[in-house]
Image (cartoon, coloured by chain):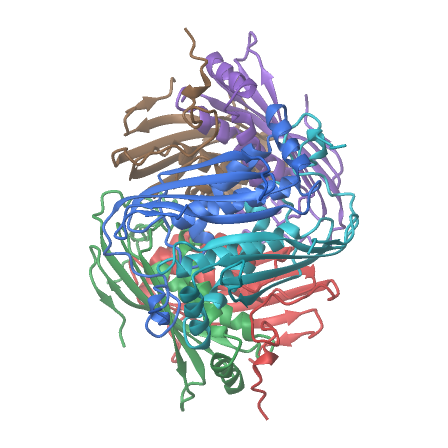
Chain colours: A green, B red, C brown, D purple, E blue, F cyan
């Protein structure tokens, strides 16, 4: 049976009004989240990024800084997110070569950690989204058709709901 | 022949250092961009959102506000984006029912306009990303496996490069 | 006897210079504040807002999101406010019908909570002010004469000074 | 006859969804707005502020800076406000002595100007609200019962709707 | 022997990628930092500032507010800085008269404190820099040649590395 | 004769109150400013930075991004600065080897441009300051004694006051 009662969306109170839910009673535990996502592009664009890495013009370095800074501003961007004292943020990249079913891409992974009363999934996901957007911005002069895709939570640890691992 | 010269990435100067490129000499013209993207979810989550719309707990209304506000902060988030005086931002939704090849989803469309020396693609894309992230945030208590996907520029009008339409 | 010694304003040091006072030694206790305020308007404007609620065009829903987001930015707006990890923010509305002594209005109530070394009065008051301003913004095309009034602290709990209740 | 059609609220599109309205076609004209408001307090609190002005501990000086800075962030706080290039902001104070019908207070006036496609009422009103909030913050240790009241638009010049003067 | 291994820069991971380092395991201790810096100017500019203090036009009062507010935004400005719950910020000035070896100047001192897992040097230094920049801004109409100089950490207390005192 | 009339500080009105001065009547002209500054450090720290550039761990690349982003936030940080639509920002570095009179250092140069009614000196200076602060942050684990110094306006073009060149 499917639960279709809107009140199961905890960001709304029983009257259906949005609120920032009370986390005051939650224990302060160590929290960690890992999110991932991908930006697909032309092979020539990927070549440009890789050449830039090797030589000059560090697209991924700039995008990483943008992603880390955005993670710190998550509660400023997402209306019902609690402010969080992030204790760690990291952004990593992997170059994805074209396969039979998917094109060339840069895969981005963001890791966020804190000790607090609420999770850091949104911080990790925000880091991924702004990192991918920054790559788009820096390469759009040569490739407007890039697609940001498959952005999702990969892992979550800590808190009452415990560990979550995305289905592979 | 593929152009793999990093200097064709205009966000880097000839030495390969990142900079915010000079748009001082560009004419002030009307610019418009439309971006789109999708968040895939369980059918029960989509039902919750739709019931909430009909009754109480307006997930999409809150997400729309977040997306519009984020568009205005694009140059604050994306390192080499120019500040822009947006003259219009709108965010629209479409409920996507499951098909043979793809699951149930909310499709989001963002439109940005300005009159200025540079385009508004990044503003439209940022609005889409933060709108999708806000939907994720509000529904994650019931569905951590949601996936944000297929975020891309759909249309672009104005400026030296003229009209761009994404391949269908 | 009235205390007119400026040094009783704790936001100034003995020399009279503004500073962000030291709360390092204060115990971390649960804090809660409730603030209220009202925006007076023409009956026809209030009708518009109520019709919008019932049908489409959710003025109060947008204003609530603005108020919650503003509460999180209080220390960024009020120079000598300490940063605070808000654990809860809620904004509620009541439609006030015209009486012999006062006109039609929307009454707004904001509740803020945290566990920390300083109170959350400013967060609750800021939420009320920005919520009322957002209502003004959305209705000003039809009613420029709206008045925001009677914004005050209603209740405060926790901390050394204990409970405060506004005189009725 | 009263217009109760929600679509007369221009911040909603015909479907009733909030948007940042298109001002792209509006002429760039000189715009000016003056807003006012008052914070009522105990006579002893007003004495403290006045003594502070004369000697040390400049409450109103700090509040003025906060109000001017807040005016520049209006579009960041009010969801559907357009970004505006303010060309002038000023905040003025008047000490209001107690009368038969109203208590002692500080009256605040904010003036905002720009040349652009939309008005600056929200900037002037935001400056007043944050200025009053800052006075509250700096004096709350001695007077939690202060009330911010009578915040409204006093004058508006420029734009299609022309001059607006509040009823006296 | 000089350590020239880039990995001794802790803001980079072993691969050389920037990250916000993990402070999750660090104990929450009391931290304090004092930073100083100076803005050199013409004697006539210094006279203006001092006359303004005595009479009207409080340059240093406005600059102090800017410095305190900037300290709270340090983690928003410096990419790899952790968000910190500042428990105290103060900014002090000293008028420096011309000597044989250095010209007239305003010396600025900023003190920051917190209880947490990382130090507050950056908060104190940021307060100094933005305070000096604000003095520059307010006096640049009469003296464009002002120089901000000798900005450094003076003292640091708390944390694993313990007390640091700048060489005199 | 020295002008010591505080009213010659244009950021204060005739009463001595701070305000954001009216630039509404000023012509929109092309403006450019170049600012410079230096961070002095131990030779071993400079070696680390240079090795990092050559190999991994790009201190200057991260600092450049921070400086460019800060330039865009100048009016948010400096109380009486006007919002400006920057059309270009660039940050450049030069490695300074030790001489008889000064130690090893990184010299930073920031260039800002716009077309508007007010200059961009503050934007260029803010970029320099935040760039230097970011270098300090990234290297402070190995060298707390670094000194940021000699930050000043080097060139200014456009506007009523015309060209300014710093004395060599």
- The quadrant holding residue B17 is bottom right
Which sits in the foreground, A8 or A53?
Answer: A53
Q: Where residue B76 sits: x, y (%)?
A: 53, 57
Which of the image's four quarters has the N terminus of chain B?
bottom right
Which sits in the foreground, B48 or B14?
Answer: B14
**Number of numbered discs overlaid on the protein picture:** 0
Left or right, D82 with reference to D42: right
Q: Where residue D150 sits: x, y (%)?
A: 56, 24
Does E39 appear above or below C36? below
At 75% from the left edge and 43% from the top edge, which residue is drawn?
A: F24
At 37% from the left edge and 71% from the top edge, which residue is drawn?
A: E4
Which sits in the foreground, F116 or B67?
Answer: F116
Q: Where residue E34 sits: x, y (%)?
A: 40, 42
- The quadrant holding residue F21 is top right
Residue E52 in view: yes
Which sits in the foreground, B88 or E54?
Answer: E54
Residue A130 in view: no
Question: Which residue appears farthest toward the bottom when viewing the image?
Answer: B1
Which of the image's four quarters has the C terminus of chain B?
bottom right
Q: Where residue A94 sits: x, y (%)?
A: 38, 79
Left or right, C100 with reference to B118: left
Left or right, D153 with reference to C167: right
């Amino acid at each position: 049976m499917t639960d279709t009662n809107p009140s199961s969306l905890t960001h709304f109170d029983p009257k259906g009004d949005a609120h920032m839910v009370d986390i005051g009673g939650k224990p302060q535990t160590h929290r960690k989240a890992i999110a991932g996502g991908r930006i697909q592009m032309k092979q020539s664009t990927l070549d440009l990024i890789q050449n830039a890495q090797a030589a000059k013009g560090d697209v991924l370095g700039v995008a990483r800084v943008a992603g880390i800074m955005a993670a710190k501003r998550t509660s400023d961007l997402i209306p019902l997110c609690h402010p969080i004292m992030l204790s760690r943020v990291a952004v990593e990249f992997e170059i994805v070569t074209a396969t039979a079913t998917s094109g060339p891409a840069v895969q981005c992974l963001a890791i966020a950690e804190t000790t607090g009363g609420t999770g850091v999934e949104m911080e990790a996901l925000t880091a991924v989204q702004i990192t991918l957007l920054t790559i788009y911005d820096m390469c759009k002069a040569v490739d407007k058709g890039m697609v940001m895709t498959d952005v999702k939570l990969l892992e979550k640890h800590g808190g009452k709901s415990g560990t979550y691992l995305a289905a592979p």
